[in-house]
Image: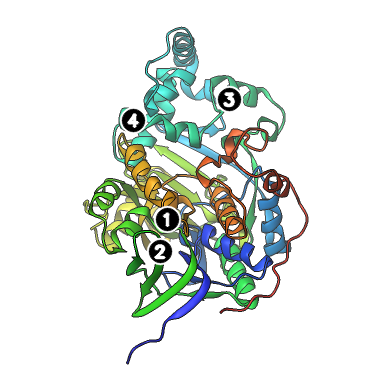
Amino acid sequence: MKIPGLHSRVLILGAGPAGLTAAYELCRTNIPSIILEQDSVVGGLARTVNHNGYLFDIGGHRFYTKVPLIEQIWKDVLGDDLLVRPRLSRIYYHGKFFQYPLEAMDTLAGLGVLETARCLASYVKARFAPKSPEDNFEAWVSNRFGSRLFKIFFKEYTEKVWGIPCDRIRSDWAAQRIRGLSMAALIRAALSNGRGKGTGIKTLIRDFYYPRQGPGMMWSRMRALIEAQGARVDLNSPVEQVLHDGTRITGVRSSGRTYTAEHFISSIPIRDLIQRLSPSAPELEQAANGLHYRDFITVALMVRGSNLFRDNWIYVHDPAVKVGRIQNYNNWSPEMTPKAGTSCLGLEYFCQQDDGLWNKSDADLVAQAVAELSHLGLATSEAIIDSAVVRVPKAYPVYDGSYQSRLNVVRKFVDSVPNLQLVGRNGMHRYNNQDHAMLTGILAARNIMGACNNLWELDIDSGYLEENSGLAPEDLAALESTQPRTPRAVSVA
């Protein structure tokens, strides 16, 4: 039996933060939308997994933003369930733990007087003789910290995350993720009696918002709000074909059904979007196929004992173990753990879908995680009471040497298709936080309403509210607004 098609004014691909927030914004002006989501839950990478009552993220998700509008949406949706949490994290290096953000006496005690002096000398050298050209991650960080601190606190972890040498990672990634951070900024923060807020640097922020039961709570609740206003979210609906006539997107096929719309917003990985074009575009597909992703595995271990360590998370700079970061979800929110006297730890591994780590059985991954946790001295194997494994493909867009030229080919195509907009982390192949993803969704929705926002010029962390961002003046004013925003009722066409 042929399944009937569906039509809406706007069709959104992907129910992560960007896609859901676009629908939320559309609801305010009575514009109907349908969201297609391939998974059985909403939230994308920001979802929360429930395993026998234990809750854990797919990577920790701090709720912090410089944009009042985004903060207000969090508060409107979550109300009293949005907690303010202290940020505590450390770096594990050579069998020692270092406070991060760095603290002067702690770093001195950990490295010793001689090594600290060498690091300062290396920093001074970098100031007078910086690496040139500054087109890769190693050069960018070394010029701001010195090559010695780069090797101690950046190299090992970064290469675990990306699986390639630091000199093959574009400096764009460093400038985007740790903008404003330098030796001078760390020294000022270390000597400050404040909580890091005055710096304005996200890496140094020591307090953040967090939903009482994890970030998935935010996105499940937003889904309920937009559906109550008439929007539609179709789960288990992967995008199979993106139909076009050479000038416009005409429809999307999913689960045997054809969805048509006037406007399309995509937050799915660019490579997937282009591969599903019908008719196909070989040259465009060749460019998109060269965009690479880093895949991700979380091994959640439920452990006897509480207060195992005080951190929200630990960065592991130790080549003897594969784990890159360890989350302690009890310290994100007390309600992430259902039983007193137990803890939920998330051991995070960065890999590729075709490598040995990804292809290990769940049992082998758990055994490896338990052994590495014991090696680090954080818990013994006898303390483990339960476990869960979650694999996430295409978790992080890679900024390698060719990504920008390939992305430019895709952008040129999108610019030629007036009813298609790309939003979100994977939708734009930009490794940004969820507040940026949400903002791209909002501005894409406003473009449908008649605005002319250039989403590619949007850069939250560069102080864009005071700079020329390419946004319309009325949108800049609205982004600074903290007035509550309640969607109005909509109906699906």
* Residues at marks 2 and 1 touching, judged by CB atoms closer than 8 Å: yes
Circle 2 is placed at which residue position? Answer: 249
| Residue highlighted by disc 3 | 186
Element carrying mark 3: helix
Mark 2 crowd level (few <14, some 14–19, many ≥20, 10 Å Cα): many
Q: Which residue is mark 4?
A: 166
CA gap, disc 4 and disc 1: 36 Å
User: Type of residue at label 2?
Assistant: Ile
Please tell me which of labels 4 and 1 falls first in the chain: 4
Relative depth, front residue between 33 and 449 = 449
Numbered-mark total? 4
Which amino acid, by three-letter code, is at mark 4? Cys
Q: Residue at x 50, y 43 (%)?
A: 456
Left or right for 93, reference 166: right
Identify the mark nearer the N-term, 2 or 1.
Answer: 2
Is residue 16 positioned above or below 399 on the image? below
Query: How many residues crowd around disc 4 within 10 Å: few (fewer than 14), some, or many (20 or more)?
Result: many
Circle on res. 417? 1
Left-right relation of 298 to 104: left
